[in-house]
Image: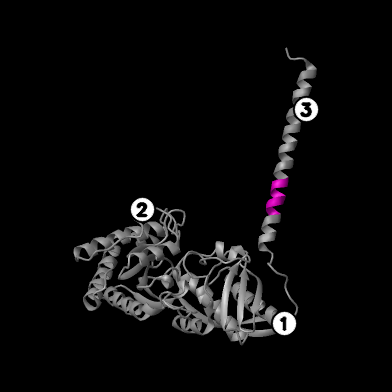
Amino acid sequence: MIPRHFQITIGLVLLAILLSGLVVLRLNRREEAMTLRAEAAPAAPQVAGKQERIQVLIAYDDDQALRWRPADVFLPADRGLRVRETLRAVLAQYLQNPSPHPLAKGADIRDVYFIGNDTLLIDTTAQFADGHPSGILLEEMTLASLIETLTANVPGVNKVKFLVEGKERETLAGHADLMSFYQTAAVHELAKEFE
Amino acid sequence: MIDPSHGGYDTGADFGGKLLEKDITLKLARELRKELDDRGIASRLLRDSDVDLALDRRAEITNEQRAGLYIALHAGRPGRGVRVYAPMLSDAQPPAGRFLPWESAQAPALDRSKFAAQAIAAELRKKDLAVSMLGVPLRPLNSIVTSAVAVELAPEGADLQSLDNPRRNSSVASAIASAIAQLRGQTGARP
């Protein structure tokens, strides 16, 4: 026969274990929700500006083609911010559901940096590269659509290079070169082959 | 020099159902080596097992071996048929004396690479395959000093398993080998 006080102690211990488990489970769920919110949040704050209708060059995987279409974007006066918002307008098209050229959630432009007046560094989020579908054509279409949209809307950019989380990366997703600077004139020729 | 792209931890594209780009490229590379052997053309594979090999190392080995032609094999969505790529040098730097810049070492061979890509595309078309040709900035093609091309198998529409179709891939390998034999006859290049 187990003494009554021992039964009560065991009962209390089991209850404590159960309650601790529930607390841990709840904390885990809260952390997951916070992570998801952080991934979905933009890498840089939205900016104020005048709404403008611009043309963006969009990749269509099914047709293996790039096609221009209009987009309404808030564009500030600052040249760097205009570049960033223009590129974001392209990514916004890819992050829709359904998407003509799906990219991973969290794919975004962190910042852009001018070197002189005509050379641009585009810093992307990790999700842009880590979650990008792998394939020569898919990767080249992404880069061509971003660079062509940029040069169509922000004149004077002649060279572009992509960074991921502020660092150089060899390729976008195993294929397209991210180490070199892209001459926008050469990309224009490449994009024409997709149109 | 035949380069079955990816390998080891670098799986390349994942087509689901355990079908990975690195395995498709290795099978195709072995098939191409067999086709070249049948035509009396010596060839080497940059990898003949599931190992990691850095992109720059692939270019280094090809340059060290003084290969006559470098051909990278890939597989990827979307579309159908086969895509043939020639290098595109977006920002070629001028050589510093006898030394070529690593990122644009391909510059002197660019015309020969485009010619090789056209020859391969023409032979693939003879096999009734849908073929498209593009110039793209693709690693490690731009660091290779000899003629360099890439060939990408695309699935037949939504049928991703078609990437592993031995009959289709044998046809592709045969067409590439025929093109290489022609190029060798015209230029005397070693593959």
B190 is higher (above) or lower (below) than A156: above
Q: What amino acid is labelled 1 in the image?
A: Asp
* Disc 2 element: loop
Looking at the picture, how far across and down is residue B6, in whole percent? 42, 60
Q: What amino acid is labelled 2 in the image?
A: Ser
Label annotation for residue B107: none
* Disc 1 element: loop
Q: What's the residue at 72%, 50% (across, down)?
A: A30
Q: Are marks 3 and 1 on the same chain?
A: yes
Q: Quadrant of the N terminus of chain A?
A: top right
- Tags 2 and 3 touching, CB below 8 Å: no
Q: Chain of mark 3?
A: A
Q: Which residue is mark 3?
A: A12
Q: Quadrant of residue A4?
A: top right
* Mark 3 or mark 1, earlier in chain: 3
On whether residue A28 falls in the magenta region, the answer is yes
B106 is higher (above) or lower (below) than B47: below
In this picture, which residue range is highlighted in magenta?
A27-33
Q: Chain of mark 2?
A: B
Q: Which residue is mark 2?
A: B49
Label annotation for residue A78: 1
